[in-house]
Image: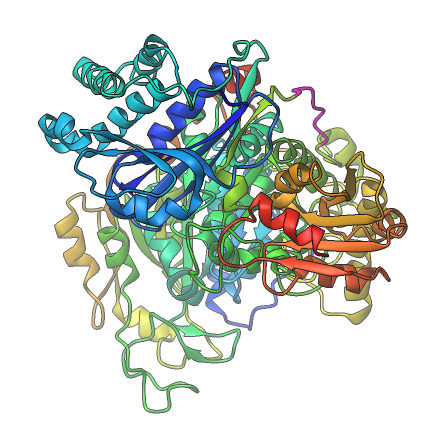
Amino acid sequence: MKDELVWQLSGEAGYGVLSSGEMFSKLLKNLGYYIFTSTEYPSQIRGGNNSFTIRASKEKITCPGDKIDLFIALDNDSIKMHKLSLKKGSAIICDSSAKVNVKNSLMIRVPLNELTSKYGDYKKVMMATVGLGASTKVLGIEKNIVIKLIRERFRGKNPKIIDDNIEAFSQGYDAVNNETKFRLKAVKSNDKGLMLINGNEALSIASILAGCKLLSCYPMTPSTGIMDYYSKHQESHNLVMHQAEDEISAINVALGASYSGVRSMTATSGGGFALMNESISLAGSAELPIVVVLGQRPAPATGLPTRTEQGDLRYAIHAGHGDFPKLVIAPGDAGDCYELTLDAFNYADKYQLPAIILTDKYLAVSSESVPEFKSNYSVDRGLIEKNPKKLELLEKFKRYALTKSGISPRTLPGTANGMQCSIGDEHDEEGYIIEEAIDRKKMMDKRLRKFESMKKELKGKGVKIFGIKESKNLIISFGSTKGIILEALKEVKAKFLQVRIMHPFPSEELTKKAGKYDKLIVIENNQSGQLSSLIDEHTHLKISKKLLKYDGRQFKLSEIIKGVRNA
Amino acid sequence: MLETKGKPNWCPGCGNYGIWGALKLALKELELSPKNIVLTSGIGCSSKIPHWIRTYCLNGLHGRALPLAEGVKIANHELTVIACGGDGDGYAEGMNHFIHYCRSNINVKYFVHDNQIYALTKGQPSPTSDEGVITKTTPYGTIEKAINPVLLAIASGATFVARGFAGDIAHLKELMKKAIKHKGAAIIDILQPCVSFNNVNTYKWYQDRVYKLEKPLSLRMEAMKVAEQWGEKIPIGVIYETIEPAYEERIPALKKSALTKSKINNIKGLFDELK
């Protein structure tokens, strides 16, 4: 009996590895286990190797497991590819015809091919279902619970699909002998009300709660999940998911909606973000609120489209030509995605600027079980003048009035007496194109004042400290490494500082909080140490060690533990 | 009512003045309230037009007038939304948007000031410059063939395609009114003499060639034949018109009300789905 277990389903693309994995993770969560799932897949529709990994535990967990306990190989290549990730004493469920034996692993041979030959076109997907059946038995889970889940999952589909899946599942279940070694210790059923949620979903829900009604995108991994989420909920939640012809159009449609007074968002990855850059600068000049999700993946260029990296931090901060205020925030887990997205919409509106949410593929698609998020939220739309009578008293509405805070009230189309021009050319207070040096400087200074005003409000929110053990070592990171570092804290003597706001960089807070530690260890999923370079640029702190990884994969827990110990 | 304090700074005699006059007349005669009109534009001489008509104005980047306009419209489809710009803006930098705008049939109007030259950058060829035209950057004549915007618009699925002439304000004004009243994407390619950088396609050159179509064609192939005419005879008027549901009419969320007015509901349900 085990306190926790790592389960992996692996096979060529086309076996339905991801959807079967998702179903199984939901099952384990409903049984009361804490879950963390992660997926790896290549950028192709057929072939290659897909894997879906579930770590299930009695205790709260925040990262995937490094080594696999129970492995379901839908093809022989999967065994070759993943055998180094198997724990000593693991079990492999594979096809009866598989000749291969893996040292220190129990081979559980199931006639995956034979049992599914009758399903024709669906054969491959059904092999995954048979595999689920076999692993359900190995884990000691009652058959009927899964059958109920299958019915739920395929609700509304052709009854034949449901029957076939139940049949395939049962055959897999019955094909395995009673095996007690891999059973998970029973936990109380899920009365905790846990959700199984990934970064993209948390971000999408937060945006909807924030009142974002238009998502305008061009599909790009890893942010496409946000499009899927909006598409699925457009009718029930009065949303528009606009798929544009390219990322330039996508962001401009979102900016047009923002001008009309609707909160809007676009989501992409590095390449698409590059196309959006000129328009981010337009948002800076025209002072249009906009939220841009940059789901990072390994670059340069197309890079590794379906893998993970944190190589666009500098790029996000410097996005758009020219000097203008913007906000860049970096959530570290699903909870942060939710919380910081809610904030991003308010800041974007209040300071009338682009807010960039920096995620990555790992964060976007990894699911964890968490309690339901709080849904109390107060919308701050910033300064919008809606009263035509007030506006009538003005000789002319000044869209870019030179105020002390730098924030100028805006008007929305449809408001009488509020006609104004919002513009990417340098302009005077009324929005007319100007050329004079003195007017240019005034407008630049006004925009800078907004940045200073925002900085004041963000004070105290830029970094967060974790860890209970007293230590002179401090780990510093941003983004998706958070959950792995939190688990590493159980093993190493260190505290952990998460940088949450990347721009404006929280230099004062960081100096104050990190200054008292002897050893600073910065952990980043990029080659050049972009966060480290920001710390060098903005503070006098001395970094003792940089732990960098840039092979397109997330850090393993063991790598972080070892890296911190050796620091 | 639509007048602004500032006056246009186009060259004296510029075709933009005629288009400016026609647009103001069209908006007045349709009795549209300026507060419910949004003009978007890109970059170029013509893209400055929203500054001199007192409505809501969103003057964005080169080539991006259309996506901005689409966003304005999706957010509040009760507004009259017109994208303005030149041939370089719309048919070079923004060509991708143009084609997709045509096929979307979104109820945004697109009025293109087509002077067959880049004027603000002082005289380079544009996508509508006739093949062989000699300019500063094409001393041996342009190599590429000219784009035919009206033919392209019809082929791309637009439901209202017209050509106007800046030298005939009364006619152009009527075209604009029809375009604004049309429920769906409506394009007017407007022949616009550039008195500073295009000494080939002058007022006289256009006047000698344009002829008015009596009524729009509703059969695509027939309309395309007319749209193909260029050179000795150039048709102006509504070339093609058909009725199809507009983009915003087909979006479930916009059926009840404009997005600006809709309410958020049932966040709890979104959490429950993940349990």
Q: Position of residue A142 (x, y in %)?
A: 36, 10
Helix, strand or loop: magenta stretch = loop
> Is A379 colored magenta in this rendering?
yes
Provide the residue span drawn in magenta: A374-380
Picture quadrant of residue A432: bottom right
Q: Is residue A156 above or below residue A34?
A: above
Q: Position of residue A276 (x, y in %)?
A: 52, 56
User: In this rendering, would B62 be left or right of A347?
Assistant: left
Of A266 and A505, the residue lying toward us:
A505
The residue positioned 73% from the left and 34% from the top of the image is A385
Question: How many discs mark residues in the rendered view?
Answer: 0
Q: Is residue A225 above or below residue B236?
A: above
Outermost residue toward the front in this view: A104
> Is A356 colored magenta in this rendering?
no
Q: Position of residue A314 (x, y in %)?
A: 64, 60
Q: Is residue A201 above or below residue B53?
A: above
Q: Is residue B80 visible?
A: no
Picture quadrant of residue A454: top right
Q: Position of residue A43 (x, y in %)?
A: 35, 51
